[in-house]
Amino acid sequence: MEKLTNLLDMNHAWLSEYLTSIGQPTYRTAQLYNWMMQGAALGEMSNLPKAMRERIAADGVYTLPKVVTKQTSKDGTTKFLFELADGERVESVVMKYRHGNSICVSTQAGCRMGCKFCASSDHGGGAKFSRNLTSGEMLGQVIVAQREIGERIGGIVLMGVGEPLDNYDNVLGFIRAAGAENGLNISLRSVALSTCGLADKIRQLAEEELPITLSVSLHAPDDHIRSEIMPINARWGVDEVLAATRDYFRATGRRVSFEYLMLAGVNDGDNQANDLAEKLQKYMRDMPYHVNLIPWNDVGGRFAPSHPAAVSRFNERLRRHGVNSTVRRSLGTDIAAACGQLRAGAK
């Protein structure tokens, strides 16, 4: 058997093997897993033998993220600061929509992508990258948040602290666990993965046959601007990212979306709108895609948000070029829970 870890990191086969190793029958696997998906403490697992619970506690292999702070926005958004078993801290956000609740999950403690407009990176004032989160630590964010709000969470966006594709294996394990019928049973069509453009991993993800939504953080129409605000562009430029995104759609048939953060005087001019439309039409012609224009949420530093009139003008220009685009409504700005505002190691 592999080295003991958090039980939430284990699939059913591995969990069953662990229970067998401590002298428990395999039918206990489903019982234990059901309790864990509810976020129950060992003492609450009333249909499990006391000796079994004591052994699990002694092994120290069942841990859930601890809620350090919980803030609720005037728009109903709830932000959690979670502490993990080793003391690392990450933030997650539950967003309430008419169609149900979605959670923005963190995938790393810190982020090494270095985007200059983002609070999760050291450029944005956040903590430097510390480590990848395990699949169980991601799963735990959903489980605990769901228990805290007392309502089902039916959607997941991997847009919290960290770059999901930089933690590829653990993120894939989390997605599969979240979608499992005997787990959280969240439809994978309600899961969105956001990446700043790791082209090789986008192509790898296309081979996984997961019906999730891919969201690409583009934020600029050309390499000159994108390299200034996103250091990762030195490795994978705009054309390579768009080519990989096109290949993703061809392999999966799943519509993709592009995130475009509106920064005053940086990427919000008429020329940038024209160039963006031209670039998207070059690579994504006749494919279903959508552009989310995101007003920048202030996290300090040298940037300023685009004026609402500039955002509206940019949107209209894209639409005149035939690009399907909308302006995203920011949720949770009053509690620093909006896009780009989450921090690793928050106090």
Image (cartoon, helix red, strand yellow):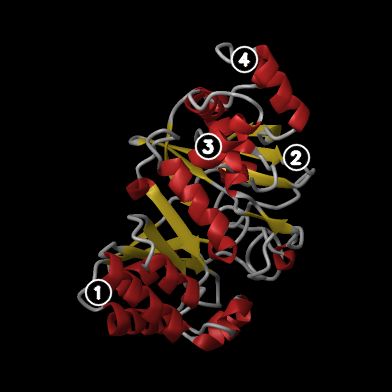
Q: Earlier in the sequence, mark 1 or mark 2?
A: 2
Badge 3 density bin: few <14, some 14–19, many ≥20, Cα 10 Å: many
For the C terminus, which image quadrant? top right
- The residue closer to the viewer here, 241 or 273, is 241
Q: Report how far apart the C-alphas of labels 4 and 1 lie in the structure.
A: 58 Å
The image shows residue 152 at horizontal and vertical percentages of: 43, 29
Quadrant for residue 5, please give it: top right
Q: Is residue 74 above or below residue 119?
A: above
Q: Report how far apart the C-alphas of labels 4 and 2 lie in the structure.
A: 20 Å
Q: Is residue 171 above or below residue 182?
A: below
* Amino acid of disc 1: Arg
* Amino acid of disc 2: Ala
Identify the residue at image location x=59%, y=24%.
24
Secondary structure found at label 1: helix
Residue 87 appears in the picture as rendered: yes
Q: Earlier in the sequence, mark 4 or mark 2?
A: 4
| Disc 1 and disc 3 in contact, CB within 8 angstroms | no
| Disc 3 and disc 2 in contact, CB within 8 angstroms | no
Residue to which mark 3 is pinned:
77
Q: Report how far apart the C-alphas of labels 1 and 2 lie in the structure.
A: 51 Å
Residue to which mark 1 is pinned:
320
Q: Nearer the viewer, mark 1 or mark 3?
A: 3
Residue to which mark 4 is pinned:
44
Secondary structure found at label 3: loop
The image shows residue 184 at horizontal and vertical percentages of: 44, 35
Badge 4 density bin: few <14, some 14–19, many ≥20, Cα 10 Å: few
Residue to which mark 2 is pinned:
85
Q: Earlier in the sequence, mark 3 or mark 2?
A: 3
